[in-house]
Image (cartoon, rainbow, N blue to C red):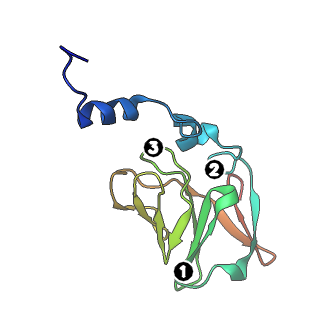
Amino acid sequence: MPGRPPTSRRTILRGAALTPVAGFGIAACGPGGASTPATPTAPVDLGAESEVPEGGAKLYRDHNVVVSRDTNGALKAYGTICTHAGCAINKLRGTTLVCPCHGSEFDATTGKVVRSPATEPLAELPVRAEGGKIVAGPGA
């Protein structure tokens, strides 16, 4: 068009960033868009205690919980909703949790942030072994 400057790459990218894409709204990242609660609201049976190795961790995606066991056999549990943008963490690499949204990483044995952009640790949850099963969440 005469008299109109050509559209720059920056203008196109800026417009694309502001245009919502179906299925990728804020609710997709936040716990409100999920069908499961962000963390257990009551005690949940996670499965066999033997599934969590000594010195290791196991991610329970369906319950947004990670359980780790130290070398003395003590269990720890943390909610796996990223403290940066509320995304459900879906990857455990060794004892490192990796958020799929922005790459934050957390230590599954302490809940502490090991890679930003998150700055706050994961929420610790009560956990116990009962009859060979792991139970986590309030009242556990």
Numbered disc 1: secondary structure: loop
Q: Are marks 3 and 1 in contact (CB under 8 Å)?
A: no
Q: Dot 2: few (<14), some (14–19), or many (≥20) neighbours within 10 Å?
A: many
Image x and y of residue 46, in percent: 73, 66
User: What label does residue 43 carry, if any?
Assistant: none
Q: Residues within 10 Å of mark 3 (few under 14, many from 20)?
A: some
Kindly state the secondary structure of the residue where label 2 is placed.
loop
134 or 3: nearer the eye? Answer: 3
Q: Nearer the viewer, mark 2 or mark 3?
A: 3
Calculate the distance from the C-alpha at mark 2 to the C-alpha at mark 1.
21 Å
- The first of marks 2 and 3 along the sequence is 2
Q: Are marks 2 and 3 in contact (CB under 8 Å)?
A: no
Which of the numbered marks, if any, corresponds to residue 85? 3
Residue drawn 40% across the image and 52% down it: 102
87 left or right of 115?
Answer: right
The disc at residue 39 is 2
What residue is drawn where x is 71% and y is 59%?
A: 140
Where residue 25 appears, as percent x and y from the top left, is 53, 35
Q: CA distance from mark 2 to mark 3?
A: 15 Å
The kind of residue on which mark 2 rests is Thr
- Considering the numbered disc 3 on the image, is that residue within a helix, a strand or a loop? loop
Locate residue 36, reporting x and y percent. Answer: 70, 47
Q: Which residue is mark 1?
A: 56
Q: Residue at x 54, y 80 (%)?
A: 56
Residue at x-position 53% and y-position 43%: 29
Q: Is residue 16 above or below residue 97?
A: above
Residue 59 falls left or right of residue 13: right
Q: Nearer the viewer, residue 121 or 20?
A: 20
Q: Nearer the viewer, residue 96 or 6?
A: 6
